[in-house]
Image (spheres, coloured by chain):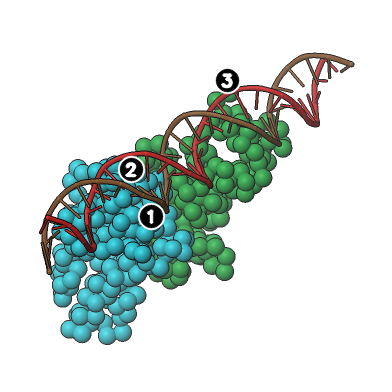
Chain colours: A cyan, B green, C brown, D red
Amino acid sequence: MDAQAVAVTEQGRRTRDAIVGTAADLMYTHGVAATSIDKVLKACGAGKSQMYHYFKNKDQLVDAVIGHYLDHILAAQPALGELADWADFDRWAEQVLDIHRGPAGPIACPLGNVAGELGDDPRFAELLDKAYRTWEGKLAHGLHVLRDKGKLRADADPERLAQLAMVCLQGGLQMAHVRRDITPLEDGLRLAIAHLRRQS
Amino acid sequence: MDAQAVAVTEQGRRTRDAIVGTAADLMYTHGVAATSIDKVLKACGAGKSQMYHYFKNKDQLVDAVIGHYLDHILAAQPALGELADWADFDRWAEQVLDIHRGPAGPIACPLGNVAGELGDDPRFAELLDKAYRTWEGKLAHGLHVLRDKGKLRADADPERLAQLAMVCLQGGLQMAHVRRDITPLEDGLRLAIAHLRRQS
DNA sequence: AGGTCGATGTACCGATCAGTACATCGAGGG
DNA sequence: CCCTCGATGTACTGATCGGTACATCGACCT
């Protein structure tokens, strides 16, 4: 009775990661519902038995994909974990922009892309919310640090400010996605950080 | 050879509208790919022959749904068409918030919900972009009016400011959707309008 | 009365969907 | 050496998918 097996072997881990990574790529560009398990397996060369060896069903694969997105996002923004000064926020914004600069791929947030599709689905809404909170929490933590150092007004609300920064970031990413132009993201981040700095 | 028929009869128009409206509702909450034609037809009591009488295929139905979203959005924000003063922008923001207040339904933008899923699909990306531009164009037009009246700095860029306002609005809607809390939208709109007013 | 044409009902098709059954492979340990 | 067990290959199922074929209905015009 293996509900979902954990990869024990190194080879097994590789296969599992390939399935999740391939599914993440396809769902990022084509959406979750439009990404069938058969397509994922064909794209990464795995068989159906692997898929259902590591995941009970498609829902659990989607769960893993959302986790993969969060990991990927946080890894690409290392400054997010070391926010201790206003200059660090500038560095962070620059890292975010760098992710989406260059000729490759659509300008979009993986979590944002699936949020529209899954945001009202009781199976994934909570996990999605949690992923966003983890992300936003890094910003809030940085603002707490700055407040403790006296670089942010004592009566400022780090959580609410972090949420507002996420609003600008997510909106910037979404508009940049539709427009295929990074300008909205640049302006959104600039506005967010200017607003934060104004609270000092 | 009727590629797609236009509704001639009053009854035909009703049926066509019912199909589009029902599809719009289902796609809004469950996504486009997860909304099958059979489900739409069953939900609105129409038969398959109606669907393919008025639409060549599912793609054309999705096109109509996107148009329906835009119409619905613009109709719910009448102030957007009469922006002639800063107070009108406040009225507009209040109208946007009113749409999503109250107990019913998810807090989300229909266009934004499908943008993540269809934004990279060459069949719909352009139409989606056009819909957003129409929406944003109303804001830009209002800003032009204010600039002509001297209420906005002469060197301000109405198009770019309107785009930034859309960033805040869309980000606010998306975060409000995931959080199931209207606060991010309130804060996002407040920030956007404060930024606009600062350009006077 | 009969003809036209938009609107509608119903049965069907091949493809694809998520998920299952079951056999086999192959490395590590006794 | 062979047994165990994770990893893998393959064949299959019933349901649902988008789309088609074709018959019929019924309002309006002549």
Separation of marks 3 and 2 at Cα, in angstroms: 35 Å
Quadrant in which the C terminus of chain A appears: bottom left
Front tag of 3 and 2: 2
Which element is circle 2 on? helix
Crowdedness near tag 3: few (<14), some (14–19) or many (≥20) residues, C-alpha within 10 Å: few
Q: Residue A151: give x, y in percent of width and height.
A: 19, 80
N-terminal of the pair, mark 1 or mark 2, is 2
Q: Residue B27: give x, y in percent of width and height.
A: 50, 50
Which element is circle 3 on? loop
- Residue tagged by mark 3? B1
Q: Disc 2 is attached to a residue of which chain? A: A
In the image, is residue B164 above or below residue B98?
above
Q: In this view, does A161 lie to the left or right of A82?
A: right
Separation of marks 1 and 2 at Cα, in angstroms: 12 Å
Q: Is residue A144 left or right of residue B109?
A: left
- Residue tagged by mark 2? A39
Front tag of 1 and 3: 1
Q: Residue C15: give x, y in percent of width and height.
A: 43, 33
Name which residue type carries label 1. Lys
Residue in front for this viewpoint, D5 or C8 = D5
Residue placed at 15% from the left, 69% from the top? A87
Q: Disc 3 is attached to a residue of which chain? A: B
